[in-house]
Amino acid sequence: MNSATNSALPWFILLAPLASAAIITLFTRRWKNLSGSISVAAVGVTFVCSCLIFGKIDISAAPLNWLDVAGIFKAPIGLTIDPLSKMMLLIVSGVGSLIHIYSLGYMRDDDGKARYFAALSLFMFAMFGIVLANNFVMLFIFWELVGFTSYVLIGHWFTRDAAAEAAKKAFLTNRIGDFGFMLGILMIWTATGSIIFDDILPKMSILTSNAAFLTVAALLIFCGAAGKSAQFPLHVWLPDAMEGPTPVSALIHAATMVAAGVYMLARVAFIIQASPAALNVIAWIGAITALMAALIATQQDDIKRILAYSTLSQLGYMFTAIGLTSNEAALFHLFTHAFFKALLFLGAGSVIIMLHHEQNIWKMGGLTKRLPITFFTFAVGACALIGLPPFSGFFSKDAILALAFEHNMSIFAMALFTAVLTAFYVTRLVVVAFFGKPRGESARTAEEAPRVMTAPLIMLAILSFIAGFGFFAQNFLLVPHEKETVLLVPMLALVALALGALTAFYLYRNREFDPIDVDLLRQKFYVDEFYGWLIRATQERLARVAAFIDHWIINGGFVGGVSASARGLGSLLRYVQIGNLQAYAFLFGLGIVAIIYYAVLR
Amino acid sequence: MITALILIPLFGVVMLYLANPRNPRRIAFVTNAVSAFYALMLWQKFDVDLAKVQLIERHTWIPSIGAEYALGADGLSLLLVFLVTILFPFAFAANRMNRGFYALMLVMQSALYGVFTAQNFILFFLFYEMSLIPSFLLIKLYGGKKRDYAAVKFFLYTFLGSVAMLLGFLGIYFARSTFDFAQLVDLAKTGPLVTGRFAWFVFAGIFLGFAVKVPLFPFHTWLPDAYETAPTGVAMVLTGALSKMGVYGFIRLLVPLFPNEFRILQPWLLALVVVSILIGALVAWAQTDLKRMVAYLSINHLGYCLLGLFAIASARSTMAKIDMHAALSGVFLQIFNHGITAAALFYFVGLLEQRRGARGLNDFGGLMQRAPVLCAWMSVAMFSSLGLPGLNGFIGEFLIFKASFAVAASFTAVAVLGLLFTAVTFMRAMKSLFSGPPNPATNAIVDLRAGEKFVLVPVTLLMFVVGLNPQIVLKVFNSTVVALAAVFA
């Protein structure tokens, strides 16, 4: 690696969005359109730089010494340029560019447009920081920053209570994950004395010699990933995060930030994979999340919430793959998912804005003719999501299913059933939202979105179609190769797809309302209610008990005791209690005299 | 040199009474400007690469008890001198008061300079007490509701703490017949200063004095009342600078002088500090009064300082050098950052109270629409306080955790929960203050005025600069950290 040419390009990627955010915040926030242009220009720079870096084989960037305590304790800001980060750079900057452009249209009339673009730029900065980080401290710093920008963007429409509440919930849930993440980092740091990934690698024997320690550390790191990627039981924030503007949902809560957990686990795979127990937990959590979220998605009526639960479910697939020790499969799915899920969200955004902020799919309908480009591209995304060959999702999902088939039959069964459900809820969504007759006033008069919004849709549709093909994907990552041509797995996947899609098609064609009503799923397994109860029952009570102890027992008992004994001391201290300054001065003088007296006496 | 720094604020007091100005605040500001200039001069003369006490002034004072007039500064002293120099003008900007107020504040400033540069105990104690009188009077004369009660409580606590500390040091003096800090530290390296059961009394006395000042649970109950009732500027100084006298005492005296006691008490002290951290954050969460909320969070944040120190103190022989350095640097950074951030938070609460006439969590709502700039800047201070990376609050806490985790993993793990609770507290506050539909009662609230922005720019800038490039502050005390680590090891 030492022979690699030193380049400033990676630094440009990191600093261009930061500069954009700073310029907008400090100078141009009154000029909304200019702010938007600055932000788009910055993300354009990052995309060009990412492409340039991608083209070079050997490239490195000089690290910056961020923290240096007396030369012994150091925390650098170093940038990793390897195939993994190169691919991620392209995804983040590429999808990011398209979504920035789309945002110009989506947020055209928004009062907070400048604030929106500043936050979006700051998010890009933080996300590139995660991608490029070569050590845990830097990773953690940008990790938290991403959570912060997500908070700001979810709460963009802060006058709505729901948005403010969702932003708060997202930040705090992420903080819970980060709590574990920080402890995990501290464990590894303490054990190996190092934070830089390349330095930890040769010291792995220290970690592997204590299996229990390693497992705990690996699981704590996974805790951070689970928070950011919204895995069960920390998944509750992501559906609520849909209160943010739709481009934000597409970029942050579908394509990039929520994939950061997967990326991070792939980055530190050498630690995770040393602990079979931790891997097992990760695989199961992934499978449970995938299944649970898919079940919930079948009974949601809000177009964005359906997509949000779908994101949870697909992220679950990726974690399953990580847990089954195949980073390739996880990253392959991350790669294709970034395109088709961003596409689906942007398509949904196009529908929502053209229907004047209508998000309920039962108020839509009859949109195939009114929004032809949106419908067509949305259909491409839907095909990719359900894994219809030859759309990209088919290949990447198949890789994960084959992996599960090989390693763990029960997880495979869960993943396969999830595939049935995926086909079901996606078909339901498309049939109800686009087909049939318009069921709402706004659906009757809707018009196609402006070109600044449809152009990114078309680009993403093309990418969603081709991203799965080996000839395309292998340029960016290691495409997992099928072992001994197990034809059974793709066959089963196709059966699952047909089963789910056809059932949904017949159930939901030309319906005015949902024929199925499962309260348990509509209420998302009551997890939110449970957490609400838990918080009320424990934490807030804890706070009140602490306040009570503070106020009565210590204040009353302890202080009371002190002042009682003080009173007992007689009139001297009573003067003080009345607040008599002379008495104090007298005491103070007495103290000084006492010192001198004792000293002289000696 | 340092004497001049201590005398400048007192000179300002004299000016206040001689000139009898219509606007006493202007004289206070001019005095601060001169102090700041002098502090910068000190920095100029100070060699940051030199790992020892510099700019020493030594004169015989009371020879019979070996009390010299000895002043000097190392990196830590310098850092605290800066902190005091920054905080006082900031605090003056918060309130417009009469002449007496500024006079008392300036006396306090002078005392603080003295405390942080004194090199022997008698002088230290003199300045320590000298800061107590004005703070008591400031609360009693200029405070809000319950000021008599709060002032007396504050006084009782800190005064009893001081007396205990004085007795403790007298005990040491009788055993070792010196008050000089450097000599005491050297003596402590060769063996215990005081032996037998008497040592525990001495330790307990000094510990009590500083623990009340910081404050550490359960010696903290004077704090919420005092901070709540004190005028904004006084609360800013109380939390920003006065509480640091306690932490400073721990670093300078208690930890170097009592290695055995700390080792024996390790689990108890760590438990106490962890409780302090959690109780501070939890009780803050339960508050509906913004000022009380910020007050309780001070207990939480200063708890992190003590966590770092107790970790060092209890495991100094086994602690790796890297952890020792991390802990000390973290504690120093935390001292500085908490001073800046907590003062800023009190300032903002003061602004809200001035505008609304109330400061309950539920008295506001939808403020983002009325005063977006005020909200944005206040959010910066809040995020700094909850430890968001990129702002100043994060690094100190992170370094402390890094070090204490190596020594006491389970205690640290619980302490890290404090970060979560602070986040909950601030998230709730931000939501009910800033977002949601606008509260009609806040209609008259205006955004930040030019003058207020002028005050806030340097402080906010400092939060960003220290957060983005902590090396700037680290440079000031790096060699002091190395020297102290050598003392502790």
Image: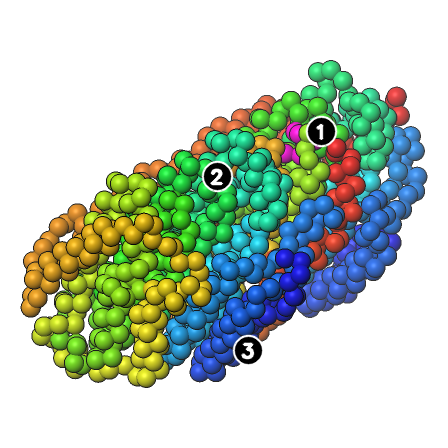
Residue A345 falls in image quadrant:
bottom left
* Badge 3 density bin: few <14, some 14–19, many ≥20, Cα 10 Å: few
Question: Is residue A42 something that shows in the picture?
Answer: no
Residue B207 falls in image quadrant:
top right
Amino acid type for the residue under numbered disc 3: Phe
Chain bearing mark 1: B
Disc 3 designates what residue?
Answer: A27
Q: Position of residue A105 (x, y in %)?
A: 35, 80
Magenta stretch? B311-316
The number of numbered badges drawn on the structure is 3
From what the image shows, is residue B303 above or below residue A86?
above
Amino acid type for the residue under numbered disc 2: Ala
In the picture, the disc for residue A560 is: none
Disc 1 designates what residue?
Answer: B317
Residue depicted at x 7% and y 58% = A515
The reply to the same-chain question for discs 3 and 1 is no
From what the image shows, is residue B470 above or below residue B118?
below
